[in-house]
Image (cartoon, rainbow, N blue to C red):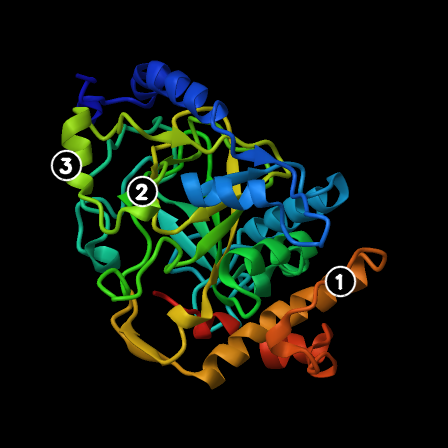
Amino acid sequence: MQPNSQKISTAHDHHDSMRGYLKDGEERALHLPNRGPITYNDDGSISKAILDAYWEYGFYVFKDVIGAEELQELRADVERVLDGAPRSRSDEFDRHGRPAIGSQFRRPAFSFSKPLSDPLGGTDLNHGRHPVKMAEPEPDQDAPDEFIDLLIGNLQIMDSCLRLYGHPDLLSVAAAINGDDFVPFNEVAFLKEPGLGVSVAWHQDGTTHWNSPDWDQGTHGFNFMAQIYGSTPSNGVWVVPGTHKQGRVDIKALVEQSGSERIDSAVPMVCDAGDVVISNRQLVHGSFANTSKERRVTLNMGFLPRKSVINVTNVNFAGRKQTYDEARVHQRSRMIAIGIDARQQRFPHERRYVYQPLVGEEEQNRWNEETRESVVKDYNLLDVHL
């Protein structure tokens, strides 16, 4: 049986105790046939080998999606936003005394957490979908009381993220997985800072359709996870391959069988900077406290099948009831069209993706200061949470 990492008291001890588990997991991950560049069949559709591997394992590592120049722009935008962030969750000003970034939006742009903590595990938060508490090592004495672990609403706080959102290869994959009429739902950036990054307790995304008669392995959609500094076994997301096909998984039983929260059958998503992972939201997945010296910044972009969304009513994580009717989905989907246009303006020689649900509406979805104010600002009030 593995040691119970809940008893580990320091970050250093935690990192040392994880070495064997991290090494074994990485070896298993790199032996899976689910990584490589985005490639196409002769008819222009996404390679069958990619789709087959995705549906088999529930995730795929797309290599070298983001070029060096775009990667630098994304990194610079993240640093700009952090430099202009509020000093604490209750502060209205940044460390320079300026009004903090995000103050113009109706939803907070930043989430704060205690270093190396597990804010969700074993709680009723997020509809109780994180049933097991992860280890919470003690951070170093000079660690801050709280730090920013999440950027919220990437597309309105970072123009580089809006351009990435319109990437033709990624959108082609989205259509191949969810259909040409795929729907967006949420974009956030996970900041897994060295010696600070929090755990995300084991869970499956999706709370609405588990008992639906037409449930299948793709019902709750997927996330693209763009890595701008790389992802290691120490700081990255771990998944249990194939669990997206099993319905609701008894996560407590998985942990008990493994002897600790280090689930035996899990593997890490190992990526280099510029890689993008596609991860089925129904996979059992989670991450450990980042007691390593390596930083991870992951830009998440999620998409759903339209049939899972239209006219569905649910209660979101904030406890508000909402219905995703055609008008709401149409307005939220405009962000795809605007992202496509923003990308075309920045990369004019690149293939332009055609988003089928909004064909003919290109003029009203141009990327400019008018649409920044009328469409992009507070766009995430229309997020879809299923």
Q: How many marks?
A: 3
**Is 112 or 260 nearer to us in this picture?**
260
> For the residue marked with disc 2, what is the amino acid?
Thr
> Residue, x 39% and y 22% (percent of image)?
25
Tell me the kind of residue under disc 3.
Ala
- 4 or 14: nearer the viewer: 4
Kindly identify the residue that appears in the image at 45 percent across and 26 percent down.
29
Nearest the eye: 58 or 260: 58
On screen, 314 above or below 34? below
Asked which secondary structure carries label 1, the reply is loop
Residue under numbered circle 2: 243
Q: Nearer the viewer, residue 3 or 303?
A: 303
How far is mark 1 from mark 2, CA to CA? 35 Å
Pick whichever of labels 3 and 2 is earlier in the sequence: 2
Residue furthest toward the front?
Answer: 42
* Image spot of residue 84 (x, y percent): 57, 55
Circles 1 and 3, Cβ within 8 Å, touching? The answer is: no
Q: Is residue 78 left or right of residue 136?
A: right
Label 3: state its secondary structure.
helix
Q: Which residue is the site of mark 3?
A: 253
Q: Could you tell whether 134 is left or right of 82 in the image?
A: left
- Position of residue 182 relative to residue 53, above or below, is below
The residue to which callout 1 is attached is 352
Number of other residues with Cα within 10 Å of mark 1, as a class: few under 14, some 14 to 19, many 20 or more:
some
Location of residue 308 in the rendering, given as x and y in whole percent from the top left corner: 38, 69
Residue at figure coordinates x 30%, y 28% from the top left: 265
Find the residue positioned furthest to the right.
Answer: 349
- Alpha carbons under labels 1 and 3: distance apart: 47 Å
